[in-house]
Image (tube, helix red, strand yellow):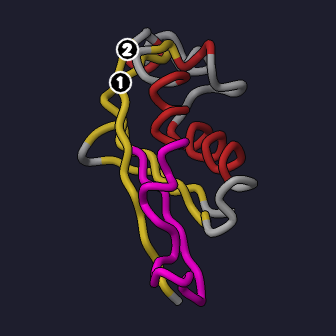
């Protein structure tokens, strides 16, 4: 099995309204998100790739157009937690990138969430 990953980043705000009012994440705040797209394949294409990294440009374009410098509560249909952001991105891109098997979202350098159905 071959596995590759490509990382993307964006800055955005969110507010986790479902939390108690005393919780710091219940207030509007922002993160510099890091997102990893993880792909795998048992075979390589004619060029020796799982997927040409350049072909993932649509992911960067989507992030730039829809997530970067946005309020994620207006974009993500569920509470914009790292878990829901990862699932949202996975579901958005799996039909386009069949080799995609997981999406990782980091809100800080110390935390990460991986969605892998």
Instruction: Kindly identify the residue that appears in the image at 49 percent across and 64 percent down.
Output: 38
Q: Quadrant of residue 117?
A: bottom right
Q: Which mark is residue 68?
A: none
Residue 9 percent location from the top left of the image: 35, 37
Callout 1: SS: strand
Q: Secondary structure at mark 2?
A: strand
Which mark identifies residue 11? 1
Q: Looking at the picture, how far across and down is residue 92, in whole percent? A: 69, 43
The stretch of residues the image draws in magenta is 35-58
From the image, tell me which residue sits under label 2. Answer: 29
Q: Point out residue 1 in the picture as x, y percentages from the top left corner.
A: 53, 90
- Per the model, the C-alpha gap separating discs 1 and 2 is 11 Å
For residue 12, side relative to residue 77 (left or right) = left
Q: Residue at horizontal 39%, vertical 50%?
A: 112
Total label count? 2
User: In the figure, 5 relative to 2: above or below?
Assistant: above
- Disc number lying in front (1 or 2): 1
Q: Residue at x 71, y 47 (%)?
A: 91
């Amino acid at each position: 099995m071959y596995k590759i990953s490509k990382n993307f980043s964006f800055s955005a705000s969110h507010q986790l309204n479902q939390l108690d009012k005393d919780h710091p994440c219940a207030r509007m705040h922002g993160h510099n998100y890091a997102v990893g797209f993880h792909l795998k394949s048992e075979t390589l294409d004619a060029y020796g790739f799982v997927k040409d990294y350049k072909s993932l440009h649509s992911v960067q374009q989507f992030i730039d157009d829809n997530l970067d410098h946005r309020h994620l509560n207006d974009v993500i249909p569920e509470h914009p937690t790292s878990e829901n952001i990862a699932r949202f991105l996975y579901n958005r891109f799996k039909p386009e990138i069949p080799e995609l098997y997981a999406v990782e979202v980091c809100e800080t350098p110390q935390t990460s969430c991986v969605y892998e159905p």
